[in-house]
Image (cartoon, rainbow, N blue to C red):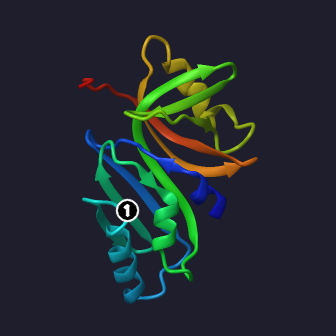
Amino acid sequence: MKLLLLLLAVVLVVDDEVLTISLAFEKMHCDECRTTVEAQLRQTHKNAKVTVEGDTATVTIPEGTALDLAKIHRALPSDLKLKSIGLTGRGTVTAKGADLRFQPRNTVSEYPLANREERPKAKDDRLAELRKELAGKNRFEITGELREKDKTIQLVVTGFKKTDWTDK
């Protein structure tokens, strides 16, 4: 997880003009932890909105703002262990050979897309479903979870829908 946080600076788009990342922790120890996490995460990005509910912190920042996960990681209390990093964002999906890649809107970054399982059952194969939807239109809102595999950051797709936007 540390390598994931140190290697990745992500810009994703959610709800038209903001970027959101969800940090799920194994356990929040106390109310002081919640208050500390909220205050520290607010300082990581100008205009960041932070909410902490239960064991999850959500950071929302304006679209086009680079999200530096290493900076966020440094802001977290050392005794809190991250369980997962969830993302939902708009961008373009392209096929490169057998692989699908996601490029968040207004960025140059690309991330390989993956299923949760390497060989999923047909009903769980989100990438096969996404590949079918690629015909003619490649703008999607992708929901997923970041994971590290073979020193590569992947976005494991849990859901998607076609979307569009007006380029400025």
Q: Position of residue 27 (x, y in %)?
A: 52, 78
Split into 4 quadrants, where in the image is the N terminus?
bottom right
Q: Position of residue 120 (x, y in %)?
A: 70, 37
Q: Position of residue 2 (x, y in %)?
A: 63, 64
Give the camera-side residue of 134 and 105.
105
Q: Is residue 77 left or right of residue 150?
A: left
- Up the image or down, 98 lies above or below 62; here it is above
Residue underneath mark 1: 58
Report the residue at 46% width, 65% height from top.
Answer: 72
- Up the image or down, 91 lies above or below 7; here it is above
Mark 1 lies on a secondary structure that is strand
Give the camera-side residue of 73 and 146.
73
Give the camera-side residue of 8 and 58.
8
Report the residue at 66% width, 59% height from top.
Answer: 3
- Up the image or down, 124 lies above or below 74; here it is above
Q: Is residue 165 left or right of residue 83?
A: left
Report the residue at 42% width, 35% height from top.
Answer: 107
Q: Is residue 99 left or right of residue 93?
A: right
Amino acid bearing label 1:
Thr
Q: Is residue 1 visible?
A: no
Report the residue at 57% width, 50% height from top.
Answer: 146
Q: Is residue 33 visible?
A: yes
Split into 4 quadrants, where in the image is the C terminus?
top left
